[in-house]
């Protein structure tokens, strides 16, 4: 453990921690744009500059030293942060009111903290390059006019999903995040997992239908047997968004394209919500107890009349391993080995 002082407050952190880690532990806010706790530090935005023993460094990359004295709000630090934020805003889209990330934008939060005012904005010679929104992906769009070149999407794609579909392209003022050949994202090797989307600090990446949920309900993804933890964003009686549950030991918040975006079936008007039993040629709603009793009775009748090998069970890859194990035990307990699975090759 190492001891240091931040803005006059003493804090003790583990060896190998950064100044930003120590500040978070103390409850001291240091603005950041390119930092994300899920990713290794990048140090590209230069917004988290702090004074350490008289030297200005990036808090996200500066290792803590025993006895270090840190000041996070000196005049020099404020000037550096202000200049860097103004440079970002000089080429940033001005339309915040109708932006899908309005009031949840990290750039807005940082701008307010460093003291960007309307008077200061008037001094900035703003010129936003006209770049068409990439709406080729059915799940999310890319708006380059709202990109701050933090690199979080690039690092998420490479270090979390291992696909590396994105990278910086071109140079100078024309630098932007692009796929190989500067093609639409649908023509790249992007897997549409959305890991870049959920970590983007602005609305450079945004959902095609960005409805804001009013509450979240914890659940488990049903697309396969992995059992990823998810949070269903609900608005009224409709699921409008799915996010990964970071507390889940199965997926730690990561999701695939199906788990994150394939939830439309939940809201479909034709979706079956109760078991159906055919009575007099017409399917009629029934309770689960009634349906299970009906199935058990039918299977018993078939076994009594035609023997156990007249029965068979087909399981699903969407069930967990434990559920499939119990299912095959059930079928075998009836005296037959006729068990199959939808994922069998």
Image (cartoon, helix red, strand yellow):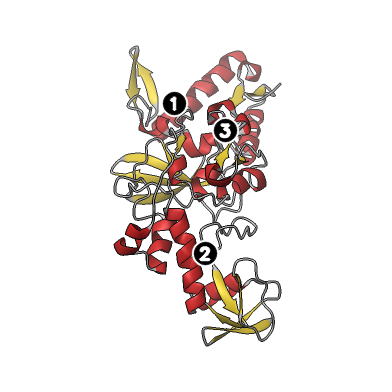
Residues at marks 2 and 3, CA–CA distance in whole angstroms: 45 Å
Left/right placement of residue 181 relative to residue 285 reads right
Which sits in the foreground, 314 or 170?
170
Q: Is residue 104 visible?
A: yes
Residue neighbourhood size for the residue with mark 1, other residues' Cα within 10 Å, grouped as few (<14), some (14–19), many (≥20): few
Residues at marks 3 and 1, CA–CA distance in whole angstroms: 24 Å
Residue neighbourhood size for the residue with mark 2, other residues' Cα within 10 Å, grouped as few (<14), some (14–19), many (≥20): many
Residue 246 in the image: x percent, y percent? 54, 54
Q: Which residue in the protein does label 1 denote?
A: 294
Which sits in the foreground, 67 or 12?
67
Mark nearest the camera among 1 and 2 is: 2
Residue 115 in the image: x percent, y percent? 38, 68
Q: Which residue in the protein does label 2 denote?
A: 47
Residues at marks 1 and 2, CA–CA distance in whole angstroms: 66 Å
Which sits in the foreground, 275 or 247?
247
Mark nearest the camera among 2 and 3 is: 2
Q: Is residue 73 visible?
A: no
Q: Which residue in the protein does label 3 denote?
A: 318
Q: Decide: is 166 above or below 52.
A: above
Residue 161 in the image: x percent, y percent? 64, 42
Label 3 SS: loop
Left/right placement of residue 190 relative to residue 106 reads right
Which residue ends up furthest to the top in the rendered image? 281
Q: Decide: is 299 above or below 63.
A: above
User: Of callouts 1 and 2, which one flags the residue occurring earlier in the amino acid sequence?
Assistant: 2
Residue at left offset 41%, top offset 34%: 288
Quadrant in the rendering for residue 1: bottom right
Which sits in the foreground, 63 or 247?
63
Residue at left offset 51%, top offset 58%: 33
User: Of callouts 3 and 1, which one flags the residue occurring earlier in the amino acid sequence?
Assistant: 1
């Amino acid at each position: 453990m190492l001891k240091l002082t931040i803005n006059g407050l003493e804090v003790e952190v583990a060896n190998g921690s950064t100044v930003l880690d120590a500040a978070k532990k103390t409850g001291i806010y240091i603005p950041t744009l390119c930092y994300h706790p899920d990713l290794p530090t990048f140090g590209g935005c230069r917004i988290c500059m702090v004074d350490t023993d008289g030297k200005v460094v990036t808090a996200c990359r500066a290792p803590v030293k025993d006895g270090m004295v840190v000041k996070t709000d000196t005049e020099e630090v404020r000037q550096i942060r202000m200049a860097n934020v103004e440079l970002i805003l000089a080429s940033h889209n001005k339309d915040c009111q109708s932006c899908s990330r309005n009031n949840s934008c990290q750039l807005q939060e940082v701008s307010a903290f460093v003291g960007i005012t309307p008077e200061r904005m008037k001094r900035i010679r703003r010129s936003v390059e006209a770049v068409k929104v990439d709406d080729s992906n059915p799940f999310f769009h890319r708006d380059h006019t709202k990109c701050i070149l933090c690199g979080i999407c690039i690092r998420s794609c490479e270090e979390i999903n291992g696909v590396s579909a994105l990278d910086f392209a071109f140079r100078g003022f024309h630098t932007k995040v692009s796929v190989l050949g500067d093609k639409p994202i649908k023509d790249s090797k992007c897997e549409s997992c959305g890991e870049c989307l959920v970590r983007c600090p602005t609305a450079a990446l945004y959902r095609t239908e960005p409805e804001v949920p009013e509450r979240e309900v914890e659940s488990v993804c049903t697309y396969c047997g992995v059992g990823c933890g998810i949070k269903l964003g609900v608005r009224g009686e409709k699921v409008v968004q799915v996010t990964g549950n970071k507390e889940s030991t199965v997926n730690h918040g990561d999701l695939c394209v199906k788990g994150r975006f394939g939830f439309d079936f939940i809201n479909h008007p034709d979706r079956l919500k109760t078991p159906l039993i055919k009575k007099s040629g017409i399917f009629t709603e029934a309770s689960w107890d009634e349906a299970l009793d009906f199935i058990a009775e039918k299977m018993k009748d078939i076994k009594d009349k035609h023997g156990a090998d007249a029965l068979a069970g087909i399981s699903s890859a969407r069930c967990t391993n434990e559920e499939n194990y119990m299912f095959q035990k059930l079928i075998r307990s009836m005296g037959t080995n006729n068990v199959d699975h939808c994922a069998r090759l």
